Image (cartoon, rainbow, N blue to C red):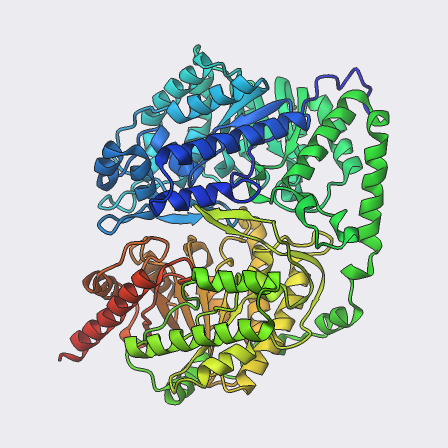
Amino acid sequence: MTTKSAAAAARATVYGHPRQGRDRELKKAIEGYWKGRVTADALRATAAELRRTHWRQLAGAGVHEVPTGDFSYYDHVLDTSVMVGAIPARHREAVAADALDGYFAMARGTQDVAPLEMTKWFDTNYHYLVPELGPDTVFSADSSKQVGELKEALALGPAARPVLVGPVTYLLLAKPAPGVASDFDPLTLLDRLLPVYAEVLADLRAAGAAWVQLDEPALVQDRTPADLNAAARAYRDLGALTDRPKLLVASYFDRLGDALPVLAKAPVEGLALDFTGPAAANLDGLAAVGGLPGKRLVAGVVDGRNIWVNDLEKSLTTLGTLLGLADRVDVSASCSLLHVPLDATAEKDVDPQILRWLSFAKQKTAEITTLARGLSQGTDAIAGELAANRAALASRATSPITRNPAVRARAEAVTGTDARRSQPYAERAAAQRAHLGLPLLPTTTIGSFPQTGELRAARADLRAGRIDTAGYEERIRAEIQEVVAYQEKAGVDVLVHGEPERNDMVQYFAEQLDGYLATRHGWVQSYGTRYVRPPILAGDIARPEPMTVRWISYAQSLTAKPVKGMLTGPVTMLAWSFVRDDQPLGETARQVALALRDEVGDLEAAGTSVIQVDEPALRETLPLRAADRAAYLDWATEAFRLATGGVRPDTQIHTHMCYAEFGDVVQAIDDLDADVISLEAARSHMQVARELAAHGYPREAGPGVWDIHSPRVPSAEEAAALLRTGLEAIPAERLWVNPDCGLKTRGWPETRASLENLVAAARTVREELSGA
């Protein structure tokens, strides 16, 4: 271990913090503002108090430099668009009239104006708002948010470092604006954007910033020579500025590869690098470029995306090696703590043995400050923490909770035949058409219907003992009756039961599977005010009993139309959980797939003819580096086929994906061998339909015609226009009509209006096709 004097400069910091507050105060304030119950001033006051609370907690825990600018009302990429003046033309009037309302209009849309497209932030489950740029885009600096939050933090006393999305990543995340040629490259706007960043940096320096962090996670992906040259030029120009703070360029989520020497040579004062998971390769990469002499290195050695305790001794070994590669080494998490819940100690229902294995944002902050202290003062200074950490790691490694011999034996016995349907698609399709008797352009929804306040209250009443199980189930039956009756009246062809009994599409199943652990307070932001509680995958997975058959069968008893069985696929069960890190993901996926295979079989045996196994996370879990993707896609697609491969030919298997870039996984979508896939397409103007056509996708598809992440109600003609666009790529006999995603977050009035318009659009286009 390095001597105390050699490591005396080590400091603790983080790149970002969860925004919502202990009781999701931000969500409640924003949604109250949307509904007119909370004033703008009250919303701003709530946000300011949350920021102050976070900074005080971080400083009190020993963080030497708190982040600012990471807070957002909706999304930090949208905040960056505001900062650089990249407001879409259709939103400029609203923004000029009221900046806050205009901001939310960009995020959510209005009845008259569509929002920005939304997609996944790299390989996480966080969604960002995609910048829309074109050759006519004019940037202008608005540093008011960044400067204001910096001043707030400095007034409390701790050192503060503004965190901004870097200019290269911002442009690489952008897309051509509507009406701009699809081959327009936003990166060509770099020279236009850099002076705006220069102005913001000058403003932050004047406000007291000693350092500013510029996040460039896009550089951990496979980048072209042109991309790397743009990064070199960007940081050459920003580094040459005289009126600026010191610059810390940060990357995370994977290894930098060819971008590492570019950043190492850049005239900036520091780099922040991820050293966890595949990004551990940054250690060798840093040594290969001769380290960072004269520069600051912020070492991300605590996993910012998962919830298991850090191996402190392993991290100290990494930090000790890094001391010889930079002038100063500070300690941080691998990325922003935005991706983990706030505090594990709030989980009073978790087995104390398991609780000691968990590390949420508060615990990760403590790990970071402990490592910084150990690096600076030597291991004797943290002897107690190291002993407790060793005991926690040993407890998990030897616990019977983590291993089930029967599950492991079944997974090892799987053969290739288990993951294949008994007949090819063409034969299955004929059998399904004869069995189901659906019209051309069949209509359906993705699964969930509005989760009303009454439903949430019923679940709360059940937990609190105010109603018994019989009373709760009567409420669920009544909701299913209403949902089924409404769909029949609206003219939907393939119905759903609406999922009123489900709190979340992953958590609901996790609570019924052995090996999973659910939390009460483990909220993580997915997008805007949408927060989820990812369950924790702590041990081997088994299904003790059927999970969905009872409610699907009840719904089917109410109608002669087919009702879809609704399951969450194995990859999504992993991606939207905090997964175990003590075995390969493919092994865990196979265990989940086998549990789902049993459920699929029971649904079919109960008379369910259409079964949807959702995999919205297939694309988001795709490794950021192309070299790592084949192995992932092999086990991911095998897991789906293993879950669905045992059904009869006339049972129709659906899957669903949403809010991701699908072009990279079209072959994988094909390899799933689902009979029907529904995908997000409304915000991206049917891009995925064209991608499927270009690939020669041979099965049925439903590119969404209703953007359910916006409160606006699309007209029947708007939906029909999207359908006609879809028909340019997908033949009518293989095209389905559906929303982009489930309707859980929507209200009943907009759901009724939008769904009726969707059905009307399908009828209109059917008539056009028939020549009527």
**Residue 128 in view:** yes
**Residue 419 in view:** no
Rendered view: 314 above or below 10? below
Camera-nearest residue between 217 and 230: 217
Residue 768, image x, y percentages: 16, 74
The extreme bottom residue here reads 434
Rendered view: 714 above or below 31? below
Q: Quadrant of the N terminus?
A: top right
The extreme top residue here reads 242
Would you say 257 lies left or right of 96 here?
A: right
Camera-nearest residue between 388 and 407: 388
Residue 749, image x, y percentages: 30, 62
Would you say 305 lies left or right of 187 here?
A: right
Would you say 618 lies left or right of 389 here?
A: left
Query: How many numbered discs sit on the rendered protein?
Result: 0
Q: Quadrant of the C terminus?
A: bottom left
Rendered view: 533 above or below 180? below
Name the residue at 78% across, 63% down. 403
Rendered view: 292 above or below 206? below
The extreme front residue here reads 466
Within the image, what quadrant is residue 401 found in?
A: bottom right
Residue 160, image x, y percentages: 55, 21
Residue 660, image x, y percentages: 43, 53
Camera-nearest residue between 629 and 406: 406
